[in-house]
Image (tube, rainbow, N blue to C red):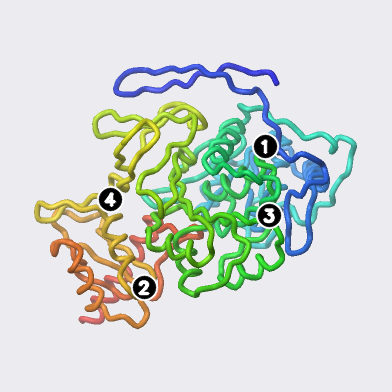
Amino acid sequence: MSRMTVADTGVVGGKRATRFKAVPEYYPLLAHAGLDDCVARRDRETYSVRHFLASVRGLTSYVPAKRHAINLCKDRYHFLIGFAAALMSRHISLLPTCRAPRVFTQLKERYPDAYILTDNEDVPQDIPAYRVDHVVPTFDRMDEEIPIISSDQIAAVVFTSGSSGLPRAHAKTWGAMVMGAEALKNQFGPSDASSAMVMGTVPPQHMFGLETTIMLPLQCGWSVHAGHPVLPADIVGALSHIDQPVWLMTTPIHLRAYVRQQIDLPGLKEIVSATMPLTRSLARKAENLWHAPVREMYGCTEAGVIGTRRTTASQTWSLCSGLRLWQEGDATWVSQGHVGPPLRLVDRITIQEPTQFTLHGPSHDLVKIAGKRASLAALNAILARVDGVVDGVFYRSPTAAVADVRLTAFVVAPGVRASAIQAELRKCIDPVFLPRPLHLVESLPRNSTGKLPQDALVTFATEMALRSRRRRG
């Protein structure tokens, strides 16, 4: 395979850094060994490489000659067909994680030539839509060869969740996405890749879902579970149809629900969690319950995966192969590999060794009250360990005029009194950081990946404050 030389260039500490490396000019669409290998499975029905490529070919003859495809498919196999068809057509997949009307208004303004790929009716009516699930596979001799895609082709535009502000768009080349999948494969080191299946509780439009439930199986020769099971009963039902080792890609929120209900999940090979911190106690309970190791991924939309760890075994993270992590003053940077040019990370990090680091949470979550500092992430972790707490978050208003503002907490804890939670928190944290008030709520406004978008949390806090004032008045 021919190679090209690319330069990674960026400005670090006021100095311009350029590094050259050889990267293949093309990467194959998938790494499966044969045309009859299984690419995806839905219940008891399997789809081979041959059928997948024929479906992709059928869709490419159906979509318009435009530049951007908004992939809103909920079924993971349909998403995969749409994603591959866009690649083959040299279209760019737009992958919004939120389906609010304002998101589609912004997409339409920024990408006026966009069309929608979908398998459901939950789409805006003012953007042309094409049903992936209605496509008839077009079999051809060309389907006997695995397509190759240019490394520098922009494959997708992914969007941040908005947990720290407004969602931002980031373009990903096919080469960077394949290199990210290879880095993950090296981190996990699967020895029986050809027999594994990936199941995800996160949507493929999210960067974590895209990396683990689409790109990783494509480049490992694994198969994809087409569904999007979230509820405990859905997970149990999906596993009942599978007779091969399953890697479950999930979030701490989902994992906590499964552990709490003590459901039986047979056949799990590995569990991979991301999108928010996972406590060691929850990871230990999951491992004891299902006899499968629990791993965590650390990364961001801008960079993709950066490091992994087995939560029950270590507090430190292992840097992905090919990446470089370093610090300039208080700032931490990552570059090379699938990340490319230097990228400044928003998290506070301590580097123990060139490939080992400790994560302390986002730099913007530090709060100062009465001259003392604390991390909201650390406070949230303490809150999560309180018996009876199902979910919870510490909150400080972004419009607070003074540094010494009191914190608020929103807690989901059925049957538990607020005073009991406060008493437990008082044992672990400084009194100045105790939440005043602590609101008991039915649920938090988390998105489909378990994150709390900043705008949703602000709106939620405002509504709760208004309700409290009405009750007092």
Looking at the image, is mark 1 or mark 4 earlier in the sequence? Answer: 1
Q: Amino acid at mark 2?
A: Val
Q: Which mark is residue 365?
A: 4
Q: Amino acid at mark 1?
A: His
Looking at the image, is mark 2 or mark 3 earlier in the sequence? Answer: 3
Q: Quadrant of the C terminus?
A: bottom left
Say whether marks 4 and 3 touch (CB < 8 Å).
no
Q: Residue at x 27, y 70 (%)?
A: 465
- Element type at mark 4: helix
**Marks 1 and 2, how far apart in space?**
43 Å
Note whether 43 is above or below 402 in the view shown. below
Crowd rating for badge 1 (residues with CA inside 10 Å; few <14, some 14–19, many 20+): many
Looking at the image, is mark 2 or mark 4 earlier in the sequence? Answer: 4
Q: Which mark is residue 91?
A: 1
Of residues 296 and 364, which is closer to you in this image? 296
Q: Amino acid at mark 3?
A: Thr
- Element type at mark 3: strand
Crowd rating for badge 2 (residues with CA inside 10 Å; few <14, some 14–19, many 20+): some
Looking at the image, is mark 3 or mark 1 earlier in the sequence? Answer: 1
Q: Quadrant of the N terminus?
A: top right
Q: Position of residue 172 (x, y in %)?
A: 55, 35
According to the picture, the residue beneath numbered tag 3 turns out to be 118
Note whether 232 is above or below 143 in the view shown. below
Q: Which mark is residue 412?
A: 2
Of residues 435 and 388, which is closer to you in this image? 388
Q: Is residue 138 left or right of residue 4?
A: right
